[in-house]
Amino acid sequence: MAKNLSRIRLLRKKMSENNIRAFLSASPVNVNYISNFSGGDSFLLVTPDKAFLLTDSRYTEQAREELISGVRIVLTKPNITEVLANLAKKLHIKEFAFESESFTHGQFLRLQKGVKKARFAPKANFVETLRQIKDADEIKSLRLAINSARDGYFALLKKLRAGATEEQMATDLEYLTYKHGSRPGSFWSIIGINERAALPHAPLTKKKLPSKCLLLFDWGGAVNFYCSDTTRTIFLGKPDPLMKKIYTIVYDAQMRAIEKTRPGIKASELDFAARSLITKAGYGKNFGHSLGHGIGMQVHEMPAMNAKSTAVLEPGMVFTVEPGIYIPGKGGVRIEDMVLVTKNGYEVLSQSIPKKLEDVCIEI
């Protein structure tokens, strides 16, 4: 609970700095982050000295169990915007700051109608900018999520057999990751065999696993609402010469970006470090996505890790570094790790999942 109390203090500090007297969160992730409540269909209203969770009878007992001290439960009957409007009048709220990315247009119109004299200030990423700096408890949960995904992956590799389909392997990987401590909340696994690995987000098919092939895994786990996301490309049997060459290029590009990680550097510089190496090798057009993304309570969150990002790295930020090269009709290679910015540099949180070429060539 203490961690969430510190978070609501941080939110109030930011509200004060921005002259905000009332902040409304409609994002389930942000409501959880600030108040510790993990249910849905609820709003969190925060003022300089009060906080209210607006929820319904499905979540009353859960809210009593989970909420940090100082947050009052307000039942939303007959409907949430009407109750919110009445509460705003009671509190004499003259201006609302609200999450423009999660508060729907319909909800906004109903609230505006209910509190006609109030002003409304849309705010994008107001809580998300707080979330991008992870505390010790959050980093611990991320490590646990990575470990559960790692152990599930190791267990799957031991049972790989020719003839298994992408769909079957994904089902097994999900189960094994769950068996090793993960819970739902990350994302559905991506598995691509040979030419299907050229699709960065390949949908699963009934394509069968040969005894010799290239195989791409992109998977994750979730522990305490915190997600992991890792990609490994492996070779069953002797690697195809072209794919072996591409693997080395992607590995070198990833390591170059990771090794540049430190406080004060721009995220765009990491993207350039990896992209310039791949471009120089002649495969720039085959690396079409960003270098990575922030990760935490959501698989994709701040900071942005791309060529146009204005983010400057700070200690506590966690993000993925995942360059890739994709050759249509032939195959693709992506290597993805989760990286923590430390006071003096970085830590690869997923380093226990092997990725050196000699470690990803296996026999089944």
Image (cartoon, rainbow, N blue to C red):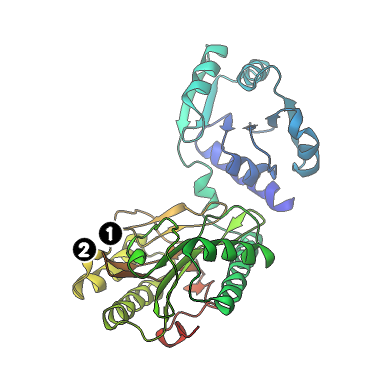
Q: Position of residue 12 (x, y in %)?
A: 60, 39
Q: Residue at x 53, y 66 (%)?
A: 169
Q: Position of residue 172 (x, y in %)?
A: 59, 65
Can residue 254 be seen from the camera position used here?
yes
Q: Position of residue 173 (x, y in %)?
A: 57, 65
Q: Which mark is residue 58?
A: none
Does 161 sit above or below residue 238? Answer: above
Circle 1 Cα neighbour tier, 10 Å, few/some/many (<14 / 14–19 / ≥20):
few
**Residue identified by numbered label 2:** 285
Q: Residue at x 76, y 28 (%)?
A: 57
Towards the viewer: 154 or 103: 154
Q: Residue at x 60, y 63 (%)?
A: 142
Can residue 318 be seen from the camera position used here?
no
**Residue identified by numbered label 1:** 288
Towards the viewer: 106 or 73: 106
Circle 2 Cα neighbour tier, 10 Å, few/some/many (<14 / 14–19 / ≥20):
few
Mark 2 residue element: helix
Disc 2 marks a residue whose amino acid type is Lys
Q: Position of residue 350 (x, y in %)?
A: 53, 72
Disc 1 marks a residue whose amino acid type is Gly
Q: Check contact, mark 2 vs mark 1: CB within 8 A.
A: yes
Is 15 on the left-hand or right-hand side of 70?
A: left
Q: Residue at x 75, y 43 (%)?
A: 68
Mark 1 residue element: loop
Does 351 sit above or below residue 288? Answer: below
